[in-house]
């Protein structure tokens, strides 16, 4: 409104100065044009880059309108597919064809074909009416959904802007503040909000805080004394913000976080005994899931290789002819008898008894991972560890909070291959609220 | 808002389950996770869709679901889920161990009406499978004494009325358990097994004969009167609560229960006659 008023004022002033003060007129026109062009440019940038802060109705409504052509196309194609008139027409054609080219095996004769055709013609007005009604409803419903979405956007606009500012503030605090209570407060607040447009900095901030609280020695993770609470909250924030990144499909950011994580934690890490083993274990499993369990030989060749690498480094002449001798086989067997394969750490839910607040955050994050991260990778089945979480949560007595049940059921629904597109918007609202 | 979402997601899952045709072996984990929730929350539509999907894909899928479920969940969950397991499914592997696990779980949970109903349902269901009858611990039969009200559709009651089970319960030697068993099994919702009639007659004359059993006999006769009264209300009346009740079984139930009642009355009259003959008057 303000920008429109300024533009209007510029136009009126230009009209007033026209022919009397050419110099002032040129200044007014230049200033107004510059402001208008700048504003248009900003809108274009906002439309092109959705993650840009300070999104306004002028931006996201055109972005939503951009979906309309595709929507209209799908509406019409679906309507044509399910059209009663079309079905009637095809039935008439079939009857006509049968009437003129009766099949030998068919028992229906010519009179029945004629009667059927006449019946179909009588049904035509009703089919037209049915199609008209269905088409009206189909056309109206997307616009109703669009209007409802816009209303919610406007309604939640201030809340959304506040959340964005909060996110910037938290990100800045995590980057600059060395004061532990301040960081703890910022992280405690971060886990209560769901950023609609998260960036890597919040994940990295949480992750750096976590790294500052722990030590990794020979794959065993220990928490620095006195920093247990900060470690727990930062691990939860890591999972929470990372899952938000996956919702937005920010592949580059996710990859950036993954690289940071794999640099900090080896595959064969052990989180046992940690208060935040579930949260961090979930991230660990997501990042290391594609890697096979290292060190488990699957055939003799690998077994001998492992032996050679681990136990007998000087006997590399074994590999000159590709076969160890019988004596050497005995040595290999002896070496393997004391060899214990190392397994990558996997998150376990058997003894997982979190507080309700932590459970809500973990369940929400895991539901997002199931819905978005694994789909992005092209995996249509949910990994077992996620289903085990749903199983564990839904088997608890008493049952957990309803929001946790919703998240667990959504994990199961994703695994079953349910289509979330119809309830996606409302589900997101539910999850984010 | 969240409860609306819960209904939405539940509806989606139910719809998806209804569309499953053929083997769903790749969905065993999802079904395992869903079964305890659907059973505990009594989401019947979802549960029916789930069980239909499992049965459609063949009974072998129970072998993937049940052992994992029993080994990983709490005793309470095992007790609540057990009535939905197809215990008579031959493809369900290692059923004997599963019965032991179930019995252990049942002995570890506190008694409530709902738990009692579930335990008795499974007990009767399992006992209906002769192979499993010997695997049931003796102590678990005491649950019959709680006499929970079983629902109209109850697989346990339908299967637990067979001859072998009657014989087994008689061998326990506890008249109260035997009476509770009969009071649970004789119901307007299920037909007594015609093949079990001779065993039933033997039981009535041998176990419920004699003056000291008069009270028990009277209880059984009153119970049968109530059952017959319900049956006299007609098939349509009963079908309101159990739509699958067929007219054939309805008629058969009437006949069988009348025959059993007659036997009870005869035994009762016989005792009275003997008493009359032996009295000094």
Image (tube, helix red, strand yellow):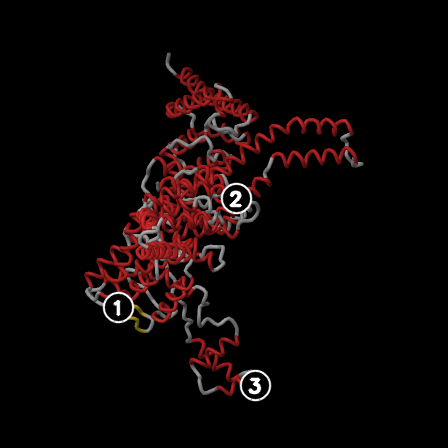
SS at badge 2: helix
Tag 2 residue: A72
Q: Earlier in the sequence, mark 1 or mark 3?
A: 1
Pointers 1 and 3 in contact (CB under 8 A)? no
Q: Circle 3 is placed at which residue position?
A: A321
Disc 3 residue crowd, few under 14, some 14–19, many 20+, Cα 10 Å: few
Q: Report whether mark 2 lies on the same chain as mark 1.
A: yes
As helix, strand or loop, the secondary structure at mark 1 comes to: helix
Q: Measuring from the top left, give residue A234's x and y in whole percent.
A: 28, 61
Question: What residue is shown with label 1?
Answer: A212
* Label 1: chain letter: A
Tell me which corner region of the image, top left, top right, bottom left or bottom right, holds residue B42: top left
Q: CA distance from mark 2 to mark 3?
A: 69 Å
Comparing marks 1 and 3, which lies closer to the viewer?
A: 1
Which callout, 2 or 3, points at the residue further toward the start of the chain? 2
Read off the chain for label 3.
A
């Amino acid at each position: 409104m303000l920008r429109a008023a300024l533009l209007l004022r510029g136009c009126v002033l230009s009209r007033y100065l026209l022919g009397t003060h050419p110099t002032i007129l040129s200044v007014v026109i230049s200033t107004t044009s510059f402001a208008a062009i700048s504003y248009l440019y900003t809108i274009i940038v906002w439309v092109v880059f959705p993650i840009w802060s300070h999104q306004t109705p002028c931006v996201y409504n055109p972005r939503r309108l951009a979906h309309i052509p595709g929507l209209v196309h799908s509406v019409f194609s679906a309507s044509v597919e399910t059209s009663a008139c079309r079905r009637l027409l095809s039935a008439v054609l079939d009857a006509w064809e049968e009437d003129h080219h009766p099949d030998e095996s068919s028992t229906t004769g010519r009179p029945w074909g004629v009667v059927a055709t006449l019946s179909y013609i009588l049904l035509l007005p009703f089919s037209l009416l049915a199609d008209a009604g269905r088409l009206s409803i189909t056309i109206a419903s997307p616009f109703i959904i669009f209007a409802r979405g816009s209303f919610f956007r406007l309604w939640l606009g201030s809340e959304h802007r506040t959340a964005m500012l909060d996110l910037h503030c938290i990100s800045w605090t995590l980057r600059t503040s060395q004061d532990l209570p301040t960081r703890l407060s910022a992280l405690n607040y971060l886990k209560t909000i769901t950023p609609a447009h998260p960036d890597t900095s919040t994940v990295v901030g949480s992750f750096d805080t976590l790294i500052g609280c722990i030590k990794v020695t020979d794959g065993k993770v220990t928490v620095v004394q006195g920093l247990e609470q900060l470690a727990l909250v930062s691990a939860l924030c890591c999972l929470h913000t990372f899952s938000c990144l996956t919702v937005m499909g920010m592949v580059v950011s996710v990859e950036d976080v993954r690289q940071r994580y794999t640099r900090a934690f080896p595959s064969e890490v052990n989180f046992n005994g940690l208060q935040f083993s579930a949260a961090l274990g979930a991230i660990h499993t997501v990042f290391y899931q594609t890697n096979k369990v290292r060190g488990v030989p699957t055939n003799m060749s690998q077994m001998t290789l492992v032996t050679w690498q681990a136990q007998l480094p000087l006997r590399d002449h074994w590999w000159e002819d590709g076969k160890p001798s019988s004596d050497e086989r005995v040595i290999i067997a002896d070496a393997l008898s004391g060899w214990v394969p190392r397994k990558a750490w996997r998150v376990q839910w058997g003894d997982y008894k979190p507080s309700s607040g932590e459970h809500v955050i973990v369940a929400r994050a895991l539901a997002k991972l199931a819905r978005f991260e694994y789909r992005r990778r092209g995996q249509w089945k949910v990994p077992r560890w996620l289903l085990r979480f749903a199983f564990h949560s839904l088997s608890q007595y008493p049952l957990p909070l309803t929001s946790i049940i919703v998240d667990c059921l959504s994990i199961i629904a994703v695994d079953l291959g349910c289509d979330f597109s119809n309830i996606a918007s409302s589900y997101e609202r539910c999850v984010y609220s | 808002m969240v409860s609306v979402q819960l209904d939405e997601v539940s509806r989606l899952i139910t719809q998806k389950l209804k569309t499953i045709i053929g083997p769903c072996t790749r969905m065993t984990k999802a079904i395992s996770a869903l079964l305890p929730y659907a059973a505990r929350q009594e989401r019947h539509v979802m549960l029916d869709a789930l069980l239909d999907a499992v049965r459609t894909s063949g009974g072998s899928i129970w072998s993937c679901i049940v052992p994992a479920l029993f080994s990983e969940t709490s005793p309470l969950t095992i007790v609540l889920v057990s009535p939905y397991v197809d215990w008579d499914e031959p493809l369900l592997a290692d059923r004997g161990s599963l019965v032991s696990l179930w019995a252990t779980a049942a002995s570890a949970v506190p008694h409530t009406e709902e738990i009692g109903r579930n335990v008795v349902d499974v007990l009767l269901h399992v006992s209906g499978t002769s192979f499993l009858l010997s695997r049931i611990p003796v102590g678990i039969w005491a649950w019959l004494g709680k006499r929970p009200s079983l629902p109209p559709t109850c697989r346990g009651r339908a299967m637990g009325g067979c001859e072998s089970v009657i014989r087994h319960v008689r061998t326990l030697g506890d008249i109260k358990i035997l009476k509770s068993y009969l009071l649970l099994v004789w119901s307007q919702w299920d037909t007594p097994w015609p093949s079990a009639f001779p065993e039933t007659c033997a039981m009535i004359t041998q176990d419920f004969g004699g003056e000291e059993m008069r009270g028990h006999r009277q209880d059984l006769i009153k119970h049968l009167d109530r059952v017959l009264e319900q049956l006299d209300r007609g098939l349509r009346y009963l079908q309101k609560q159990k739509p699958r009740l067929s007219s054939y079984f309805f008629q058969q139930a009437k006949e069988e229960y009348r025959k059993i009642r007659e036997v009870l009355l005869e035994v009762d009259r016989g005792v009275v006659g003997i008493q009359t003959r032996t009295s000094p008057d």
